[in-house]
Structure formats: structure tokens, C-alpha cells
Amino acid sequence: MKTTKIAFFIIILGAFVCCNENKSKDSYYFKGDIQYFDDDSMAVKNVKSKSVSLDGTYTGMVSAYDSLLICWYFDFPNHFFTVFNVDTGDEIGSFVEKGQGPQEVESVNTIFQHFKKGNDITTMLYASNEGKLFFWNISQSVRKGETVYDTIVSYDNDRIFFPFYQSEDMLLAYKPSDNLNKEEATTPFYEKRTIYSNKLLHHYPIYKQKSVINSQARSLDLFFYTWDAIKPDGSKIVQAMMHLPQINIMDTNTGDVVGYRMRNGPDFSLLETDMKKMNRYYTCVHADDDYIYATYWGKEAWNDRFGIEVPSFNTIHVFDWDGNPIYKLITDQSFYRVWSDPVRKRLYTINMNTDEVYYLGLNELE
């Protein structure tokens, strides 16, 4: 009897130590608290998408605002963006020209955010080769049939991703993880900076460690990969993590970050393994002022080399901005990259294999 009690105590102690070790890995690496949710806590909804018929050349990644659908593609021959009318299907025009002229770019990011300036729809593009910010006035470009920039600002700031406009002279710039050598990578963070003087205002770390070291893993920076979106009112940013079943929500005023993780999933202790067998979880995220829409995979990685057929993604997790899981949407079409149009309340996607464009009517979820 005594031996049985001792064995039981050892088992309980081992479980306690194990749990604390996992927690300590999270608390050692991640700056914020982590709250857990159950997969079955979300109401399951089977949803049907509607197709969008377009004329012209459309491929790549899409954004949308009201009647406008915008396609970004790195390999368009002379430009980066093509704009369509979703009501008529007409191709309106091609914009943001490629080249080395004063109003041309060699490369530029896709659209991460639309914002209004007066009555005009605008976006901010960062051209890393030129070291410039281009404020593209989409509304004026559509009216005039040529690319119109409200302003072009010299902005020599290496490795900006997810440039989010905040105000007339303020932006948020995401600095992704970078491999310093074969064994060490920096951890990502956000910065709040001025636009015209490029002055650092606030540094918002997401992780406690400035870098991580792991001699077993290759491409250590990929562990930190996220797809990010900003709440349209600018108050919060959501990150959808690829290698953990977790989204992070950051307050853009304070920099406070909270992680919301699916229960019984992996944690940051993965950073201390060889990381050869990691599932992929969230592939993309977008949001409106009410909800977050995160596309979910939750399986082994697929072969994502360019030109190979992409599998079908038919699960979208819907959260509110407090991190509460609301819906699990099961879609009839593949939703990999998504974009939420706040005007018509639609969630758009473009099929990575066929270039067909679909959307979900978000009003139908209520």
C-alpha cells in the first residue's frame, strides 16, 4: 500500500513538473498571457459561397472595398495591381507601374489595409528597393484611369512587413524574424514610427527574448511566421500563427499582447526541438470591426513550392476582438487567403489553383 502511494505521488509530481515546464517555455518566450479555448466551443456553420464573374486577367491576392476588387500579382508584366468592378465584372484598369522611374517601383507589397482620406479609398505601399512609401489613392486612380499617388515619402527602413497606417504622420511597422546565422534568429516585433521623419515612437516586442538559438533546427525564423491584420479602427492587430494553433491580439496603443491558443495543441517548447515535424495551423487572417476571420488547416505541411497544386482549405475560425471563439465555418470552396470588405460585409478569396473568386455573405452569419 505504501509503495502504491509513493508511485502515485511520483506520477502526480511528474505531471505537475511537466505542466510547469511547458508553461515556463511559454512564459520564457512569449511576452503576453496565453488563454486557451476548446475546438468544440465554436458553433459550427456550413456556409455556401457565391462566385464573382470577372473579365480580364485576375490572379494573385485580392482585396476589396464596396464595388472594387483589387488583384495584386508579382508577375504582372508592367504593373502590380489590376482593379475590377464586382457588379459588372469589368476590368477597370492596371495601376502601380513597374520600373525605375520617379513614380515606378521594382517591387511592392500586396494591400494589407484600406483606409479613407476624405471620401477616397487609399492604401499605403512600401517599396523596399526604392526605400519609399507610396500613398496610392485608389478612388482617384479609378476615376482618372491612371495611377494617382497622394504623396510619396522617402522611407529607408529595412525589412518592413505589414505596414499599417495609423494617422497623418504615424504608422505601425512589423519587423519579421530574421536568421542571424544557422543557429540563431531574431524574434519579430512591431514599431510605431512617424511617417515623414521616420522617427521611432514606440517599440512593441511580442517575445521576451530578442533572439533564439537552436542548433538542431533549420530556418528557425519560419517558426515565428504569422499573417497579420489590423482592426479597421486601428486599435488592435491580430496575428495568426502558422506553427501554433494560436492567434495573438495586440493593443496598438499600449503594445500589450495576448495569445489565444487551442487547447491540447503544441506550445513554444517546439523552439527547443529539431522542429522537423510541425503541423501548419493558421494560413491567413483578416478582420472587420466586429470579428476576426482566420483560415485554419491544422494538419501536416503541404508541398508549397510554386506551381504545385494547393490543397483545399475549408475551415475558418471566427473570433471577436476579445479573443472569444464564435464560429467554425465549414466552406464549400477553398478559402486560403481572405479579405473582409466592411461595406458589403463579404469575405473574399481567390482560389490558388483556378483563380476563381468567391465570397461569403457575412450578414448571413448573424
Image: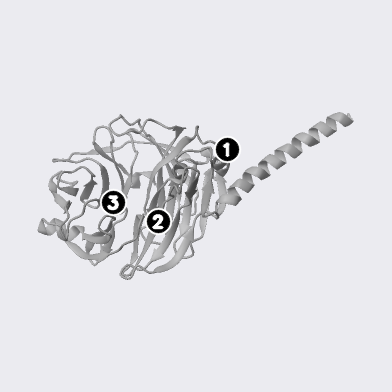
The residue located at (63%, 48%) in the rendering is 24
The CA distance from mark 2 to mark 1 is: 29 Å
Colouring: one colour
Three-letter amino acid code at disc 1?
Asn
- Which quarter of the rendering shows the N terminus? top right
Amino acid under disc 3:
Asn
Task: Tell which circle, 2 or 1, labels the residue nearer the N-terminal end.
Answer: 2
Considering every residue shown, the one lying at the far front of the view is: 181
For label 1, the residue is 264
The x and y percentages for residue 250 are 47, 57
Quadrant housing residue 300: top left
Q: Which residue is mark 2?
A: 174
Is residue 26 positioned above or below 40 on the image? below
Rendered position, 53 above or below 137: above
On the image, the x and y values in percent for residue 286 come to: 37, 49
What's the distance in space between the residues labelled 3 and 1, CA to CA?
A: 35 Å
**Count of numbered circles on the image:** 3
> Does residue 341 appear to the left or right of 247 in the view shown?
left
- Residue 109, numbered label: 3
Closer to viewer: mark 3 or mark 1:
3
Mark 2 lies on a secondary structure that is strand
Q: In this view of the protein, which residue sits in the foreground, 146 or 190?
A: 190
| Contact check, label 2 and label 1, Cβ < 8 Å | no
Indicate the position of residue 271 as horizontal and vertical percent values: 54, 42
Q: Is residue 260 above or below residue 200?
A: above
Disc 1 is placed on an element classified as loop
Q: At 45% across and 36% down in the image, what residue appears?
A: 280
Left/right placement of residue 65 relative to residue 204 reads left
